[in-house]
Amino acid sequence: MRDQDLQVFESAVAGIRDEGRYRVFADIMRERGRFPHARLRGEDGAYRDIVVWCSNDYLGQGQSPEVLDAAHAALDQVGAGAGGTRNIAGTTSYHVDLELELASLHGKEAALLFTSGYVSNDATLSTLAKLFPDLWIFSDAQNHASMIEGIKRAKCERRVFRHNDVQHLEALMNEAPAHAPKLIAFESVYSMDGDTAPIEQICDLAEAYGAMTYLDEVHGVGLYGPTGGGVAERDGVMHRVDFIEGTLAKAFGTMGGYVTGPSVAIDAIRSTASGFIFTTSLAPSIAAAALESVRIVKECPHLRDRLLERSERLKALLREAGIPVMVESTTHIVPVLVGDAARCKKISDILLNDHGIYVQPINYPTVPRGTERLRITPSPFHDDELMDRLIEAFKTVWAKCPVHVAG
Ligand code: PMP
């Protein structure tokens, strides 16, 4: 490589460092049966105990003995990899059964698995525009990068409506010709603020304008609704949403993504989406683990109740201690606003190094500049003692690094 090309990389990284948002990945070893405890490898190579407070394994299912047993059994039965794409030797009964289970979870006719939630959004949204050449897509301003990328690649007419602003959405929908096919893409739980979408109002509007609806339930599935179908299930509107997309990597503790919807639409996506067709399917052990996890989570409302109880308690204790929990959050996500990348990193470093508490700083581009935050995600397994230790640590760190932002 030429020197001037290397310099381009160097200056990109230097710029990120200057802004204080250079990403350092904590090297942690999760340990079977110990969640949320883990071990962190330091620069000297030695490991020490920490408590993880920022995992998206929201229900600790990644450590569930039944889920691990299912993964082991599939590994022993069919081997390590899928052996091909879904079309060419890469479909096992685990994949097929998992799709049926996911369709049923969301009350839809069919489901399609992808290798991640990111891929499911990107591949599906870009493909819908291929299927409908004159499609108009209306996208919430805070949609996840995977939806934004899919919509950009769609190269169709697109409009971004102000976050959760149904009136603005309607005004933009009036710009589209009445006969044009339309799709509204939005999320149920916005992962960085922890707020939720007005799903019912958006469905009302979609019906009035003949628009399709595409809902990302990545941070809702498994956690809300009587059977963990997500916020749409909780709100009694699941049947009114056309496409529900989700992940197997958060409440279900494994990996992979999916989209559910009418069988004819899923069939068309299955037959045209490059991100589905041209890649090796999920490892069977992962599909088997996810299948077990979905079945468990469906039947375990107490896990959901406990998660919400834990997050409410944590929010109350933090606020009592004067820590600015963002008021937007009405969900299990507990974002603490810091508002500055360098300070956010410093607080996170002190929590980790002095208190053994791991909360990753969240910086631009994950959140807008000036809204850098610590995103805390309790689980049913963060008990009172761990929580009290977290609060004491936060009080100490806040005294050392005061943050002057409105909470
Ligand atoms: N949608 C949203 C809203 C997300 O936050 C994420 C990732 N955190 C994804 C999709 C992608 O899901 P996955 O991690 O399974 O790729």
Image (tube, rainbow, N blue to C red):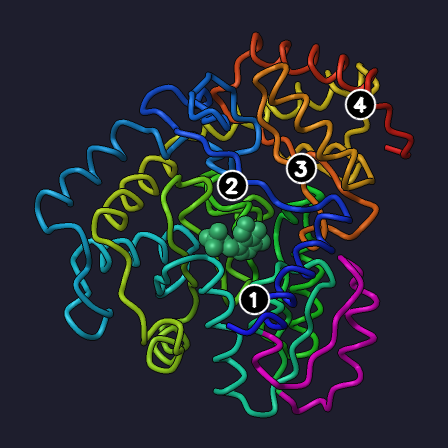
Question: Which is nearer the N-term, disc 3 or disc 4?
Answer: 4
Q: Is 181 on the left or on the right of 37, as rendered?
A: right
Q: Position of residue 130 (x, y in %)?
A: 50, 87
SS at mark 3 in the image: strand
Question: Which is nearer the N-term, disc 4 or disc 1?
Answer: 1
SS at mark 4 in the image: loop
Q: Is 317 on the left or on the right of 285, as rendered?
A: right
Query: To which residue does mark 2 refer?
Result: 225
Q: Position of residue 277 (x, y in %)?
A: 32, 75
Q: Nearer the viewer, mark 3 or mark 2?
A: 3
Question: Which is nearer the N-term, disc 2 or disc 1?
Answer: 1
Magenta-highlighted residues: 151-180
Indicate the amino acid at tag 3.
Answer: Pro
Q: Is residue 384 above or below residue 57?
A: above
SS at mark 1 in the image: strand
Query: To which residue does mark 1 refer?
Result: 214
User: Is label 3's Cβ within 8 Å of ligand 1?
Assistant: no
Query: To which residue does mark 3 refer?
Result: 361
Q: Nearer the viewer, mark 4 or mark 2?
A: 4
